[in-house]
Amino acid sequence: MNFKLVLENYLRNPFRSITLSLLVAILASALLVGGFLSQSLSKGLEQISGIQSDILQMVVWVIGSFFLLISVAAIISTFVLTVREKRKEYALLRIVGYTQRRVRNLVLGEAAFVTAVGIALGFLFSSVAYFVFKIAVEEQPGLLLLFPEEWEFALTYLFVIVFLLLVGTLSVYKIANGIARSEVSTILREEET
Amino acid sequence: MIFSISNLRKKFTRRGVDFDAVLDADFFAWSGDFIVITGESGCGKSTLLSMLAGLARPSSGDVILDGEKFGDLSDEELSQIRNRRIGYVPQNALFFPQYTVLENVLFPKFLRDGKSVQQDVALKDLDSDLQTLLKDLGISDLLEEYPANLSGGELQKASIARALVNNPSILIADEPTSSLDEKNARLVLKLFSHLASTGTAIIMVTHDDMALKRADRSYIMQRGQLIPREVSDYGNL
């Protein structure tokens, strides 16, 4: 994969690239903050015994899972739409001599790069948000929240990195293969209609 | 150099019904041939050119370049031929919007040389033949512009320049003068005639009568069949 071309395409389309990365960043932040809050709330609820605590814990995880699914759907649909918008450019790469493998790797590389930048931004946003939240909570004694352990933080960060990278690249894997294997004449004809 | 097709066929499916966009086409081109193909819209001309350029696999039959059948080649080998030996001018000019006109024109050359797109390349840094080509096409003042700022005719001329940047032995052009006025169309046809005189085979789809007058041979496509023009003048085969 030509990393320079991936980076170049990212920098030369700043509006589109940064918009996509910001979307990933917002989702990454939501996942991280949601993850920390879920963990904090669960730890707090564990202090209470009884069926109400169990139900509340289940509600926390169901809501968390719901937001996880929404984030997956949002990333997949946005990435797929963006790749489809660039079909003509990928057809042009084939015209000038790019191989199918190279086109596919470029599409996947671009998706991975946008996702990686978004994750980095998301970490920044969520760290700031969590720092502010922590100060606010520490000033409110009696709140049913216990902060996660350091290893739980690390595990949440690792989960979000792997999860979003997989979603970001796998969401375009099928369409990347499709575009690489499509006959250029078919793409050009579709664009004319 | 000899470039030929043998019993070439391309089948598509439309609304569940198979139809032949190209049917048993036979054709050859030597170095320096100037060949024109005409025909009504939708008769299979662009599909034929796509197969000649190795951009579409035929349903049956072969495209053969100097004894090598495209069907026997891997995608890597065919892509290399497309980069180095075939120049293709699509019907609608296609450009990378994030690169300047010059970067777009040189893109096949960067690919051939294994380099990434080089910024800050100026006209004076190019070899003299390429400088002459860009000046002859009248786009040397537009090289620092982005494609969005060019007219359809200017983009078409830049598209022709890009197809020629690696000195291909075959130039395949799908209606390369459709967006050009008469003066610029003549200029392009004159360039094609000059290229043919230096050994490049030109295969061109057009509705332009001026091109027919310059061609060594011409064909007409009718319902997917490629018919030598002299025969078609006498009606159905």
Image: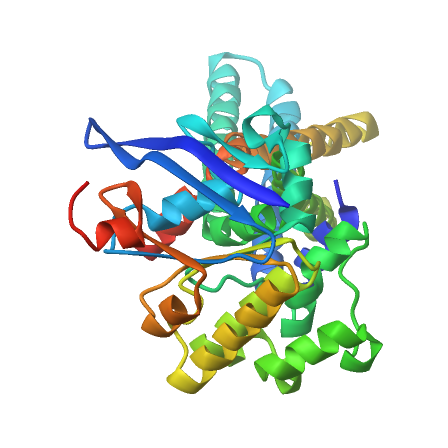
Residue B76: percent from left, percent from top? 68, 34
Q: Look at 77% across and 47% down and name the residue there.
A: A3
**Residue A143 visible in the shown view:** no
Examine the image and state in which quarter residue B140 appears. bottom right
Whether residue B219 sits left or right of residue B151 in the image: it is left
Residue A173: percent from left, percent from top? 56, 31
Whether residue B42 sits left or right of residue B171 in the image: it is left
Q: Look at 69% across and 60% down and name the residue there.
A: B167
Residue A144: percent from left, percent from top? 61, 33
Q: Look at 81% across and 54% down and name the residue there.
A: B115
Could you tell me which quadrant the N terminus of chain A lies in?
top right
Q: Nearer the viewer, residue B53 or A131?
A: B53
The structure's colour scheme is rainbow
The tally of labels here is 0
Q: Look at 71% across and 44% down and name the residue there.
A: A116
Q: Eyeballing the image, is B136 above or below B5?
A: below
Examine the image and state in which quarter residue B96 appears. bottom right
Q: Eyeballing the image, is A164 above or below A91?
A: above
Residue B15: percent from left, percent from top? 19, 32
Q: Nearer the viewer, residue A42 or B20?
A: B20
Q: Nearer the viewer, residue B39 or A9?
A: B39
Whether residue B221 sits left or right of residue A28 in the image: it is left
Q: Nearer the viewer, residue A95 or A29?
A: A95
Q: Residue furthest top?
A: A50
Whether residue B89 sits left or right of residue A106 in the image: it is left
**Residue A126 visible in the shown view:** yes
Q: Eyeballing the image, is A50 above or below A153?
A: above
Q: Residue furthest left?
A: B235
Could you tell me which quadrant the C terminus of chain A lies in?
bottom left
